[in-house]
Amino acid sequence: MDSKQFKEAAASAIDEIVNYYETIEDRRVVSNVEPGYLKKLLPDGPPQEGESWADIQKDIETKIMPGLTHWQSPNFMAFFPASSSFPGMLGELYSAAFTAPAFNWICSPAVTELETVVLDWLAKLLNLPECYLSTAHGGGVIQGSASEAIVTVIVAARDKYLRETTSHLSGLELEDAIAHKRSKMVALGSEMAHSSTQKAAQIAGVRYRSVPVTKEDGFALNGKYLEDTIKECKAQGLEPFFLTTTIGTTSTCAVDDFPSIATTLAKYAPPNIPGEIWVHVDAAYAGAALVCPEFQHLTAEFEHFHSFDMNMHKWLLTNFDASCLYVRKRKDLIDALSIMPSYLRNEFSESGLVTDYRDWQIPLGRRFRSLKIWFVLRTYGVKGLQAHIRKHIKYGEAFAGLLKTRPDIFEIMTGPNFALTVFKIVTKEGGKVEQEKHTKEVYELVNKRGEIYITSSVVGGDYAMRVVSANPMAEERFLHKAFDILVATAEEIRDGKIK
Ligand code: PLP
């Protein structure tokens, strides 16, 4: 493809993409193809002779679209959103054009420096304490996902814990102590923490224990239960070294009780003393709301914690992937992840005056992801992002309000929290088992029909449905539509109209 052909192909692709967005609400939101559908539509191998762009592009609609679940559709209310926006897409386009796996500063100074600048902008926007800024001892780095961010910090926490608690030893004694401690180290997360912490513990080769949460506490982690778990671990000879806390848990968008967590940790693993527990704040989705001053009180304790992560690609209009990880002390990351083979040596790295983001992440190469964040921040501005979040929160309240008009069908279990409402179907007769069966049937039928797409969860032992009103294309009319579909489906099932 030469540049003239590229121009024509790109114009045609952009036309198609714009049309896709303009008509997306009319598509069936969740794909209903059979497993293996695509293999049947594609040849056994690549063509011998190159094909024209027009021929390739045709296959998008006929072969790819049927197998897409349309995350950008306003009828998509499942999981958490995966944001997309035109400025975000332009960032991806330029990033692809420049393709520069800038692992060291010298490999493209702009890639590194823009990342540092926009992540500092973002830290201020989210009201993170000053210690998380690059101008202090911290800093931010873009990772691929919240899960990857947790793997990265758990490794840093593990090495810091081992280093600090064995610093008085050397030689064989040190090796034995490290081997012993490694077998006893345990990462903690609440029952409602995302599974990525357990996975990160598995990858880092440490144990995992979950801390109970209760309905009375709104399914949020609190200091009391944390204290019990720490005591239990210690009584078993285990060494807690890491804790994931959450702003916006996946099931119900609960916010952990940071003040009581900080108080417990001050008692059992005092900060800044060898053996402290590294606290990571997983704000993958709901952390976006921190752009609004009305949520910024939530960051008050973060100066006592160690790392924070928020996905711009979930709720802040930035295309996947843009997980923004911050650490209070960048040295902790660098100590764990830096390695300097001769082929990576250069005068700038050795001067100590530049950031080499390869030391802040697991891979070596990296994409120019800060561009899309920069474009988004500049295109919408602070006020635009605040309006975006507030609009979705208002839609969540409107949807919950609709559910409340039909107490004969629905019971809200939690929320709306950060535009997420969790609810179940109530039945006149039958107890929990009947309600659970009915809720499951409604959930499955709604998704099978594919007019809207929602997800389920189990909350406090009860089966529940989740509706998220934070899709970039969300409008109140789509939440009304979702409500009407849920009512009609629940009534059909209740009246035995579905066989
Ligand atoms: N943390 C929370 C609270 C989440 O809800 C999710 C996913 O929805 C994750 C972490 C994992 O996110 P990622 O897909 O970026 O790894």
Image (cartoon, rainbow, N blue to C red):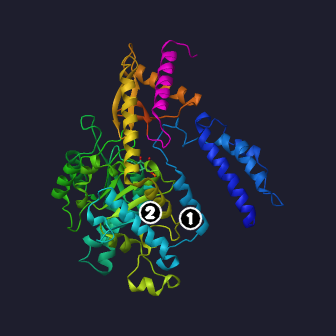
In the drawing, does residue 154 fall left or right of residue 496?
left
The image's mark for residue 280 is: none
Going from the N terminus, do you reach mark 1 or mark 2 first?
Answer: 1
- In front: 224, or 360? 360
Q: Secondary structure at mark 2?
A: strand
- In front: 328, or 288? 288
Q: Give me the C-alpha separation between circle 1 and circle 2.
A: 14 Å
Q: Quadrant of residue 131?
A: bottom left
Residue 73, how many percent across, how many down? 55, 39
The kind of residue on which mark 2 rests is Ile
Instruction: Determine which residue is flagged by label 1.
Output: 95
Q: Decide whether the magenta segment is chiefly helix, strand or loop.
A: helix
Residue visible at 48% across and 24% down in the picture: 486
The verdict on label 2 being within 8 Å of ligand 1 is: no
Compared with residue 188, is residue 465 higher up or lower down, i.e. above or below?
above
Residue 214, how many percent across, how many down? 27, 37
Q: Is residue 112 magenta?
A: no
In the drawing, does residue 394 fall left or right of residue 29?
left
Q: Secondary structure at mark 1?
A: helix
Quadrant of the frame with the C terminus:
top right
Quadrant of the frame with the N terminus:
bottom right
Residue visible at 50% across and 85% down in the picture: 342
Magenta residues span 470-499
Residue 248 in view (yes/no):
yes
The image's mark for residue 142 is: 2
The verdict on label 1 being within 8 Å of ligand 1 is: no
Q: Quadrant of residue 200?
A: bottom left
